[in-house]
Amino acid sequence: MTTLDGFELRLPPRWVVVPDDVGDGAGWARGAASALLDDDPATASEPALRADTLDVLAEQLAAVAESVRGTGIAALTAAALVDEPSRGVVDAMVTLVGQEDLGRGEFEASLAALVEGSAPGQVVHAGTVDAVADAGDLAGLHLVLADVDDEVDGVAALEERVVLGVFPPGCRDMVEVTAVARSVGTFADMPQAVVDLLAGLSVDVGGAA
């Protein structure tokens, strides 16, 4: 069995990578928001709209950077999707991290245990995802989760996410991928959107372990 030496995710337009060393999250977020708005025809030619949107978008990107920093995982790769910069909204975020000595069976069992151990009513939907990418087999769950602490008028806030493992052939290690949408319905088909995104993932495997 080989080992995972590293990986790289090539992102399509409107995905913004959160730097590994994002010390000044607010500064990075403002620069990233400015660049996105400059590339959006809706705001590039409308200075007033650009000015109104910049602070809002920068604040959301800074929140993404803070959540990444809050994990305390140094080797975490993260990116945010801003599909229409002129709306000033971060539509989704994705994180990737390498996991040593974690096979598909063990990973799927851990996800099943997570669902089984969740609070009553928290898991609204849990569907399996099974696909293949150039980097390896993909397996995991598509989840819709209810946050009862955010309940308004008896209706809980919902969160849509996809958690996948990427298993390079003949490798003892894997890449864990977690994608979180801004809201349910952000994607017409979130599992497929994440599978499509992982078409840009390449892995570097080393010698036999």
Image (cartoon, rainbow, N blue to C red):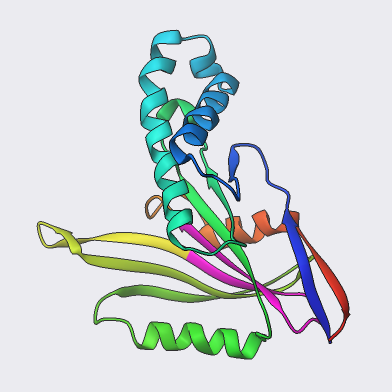
Q: Quadrant of the N terminus?
A: bottom right
Q: Residue at horizontal 75%, vertical 84%?
A: 172
Q: Residue at horizontal 54%, vertical 32%?
A: 32
Q: Residue 163 lies in magenta, yes or no?
A: yes
> Is 145 placed left or right of 105 in the picture?
left
Residues shaded magenta: 162-180
> Is 66 placed left or right of 36 in the picture?
left
Tell me residue 144's x, y (percent): 38, 67
Q: Quadrant of the C terminus?
A: bottom right
Q: Is residue 170 visible?
A: no
Residue closest to the far front: 23
User: Vertical placement of 85 versus 91: above or below?
Assistant: above
* Residue 7, picture quadrant: bottom right
Q: Nearer the viewer, residue 195 or 189?
A: 195
Tell me residue 102's x, y (percent): 65, 85
* Residue 208, picture quadrant: bottom right
Tell me residue 40's x, y (percent): 56, 22
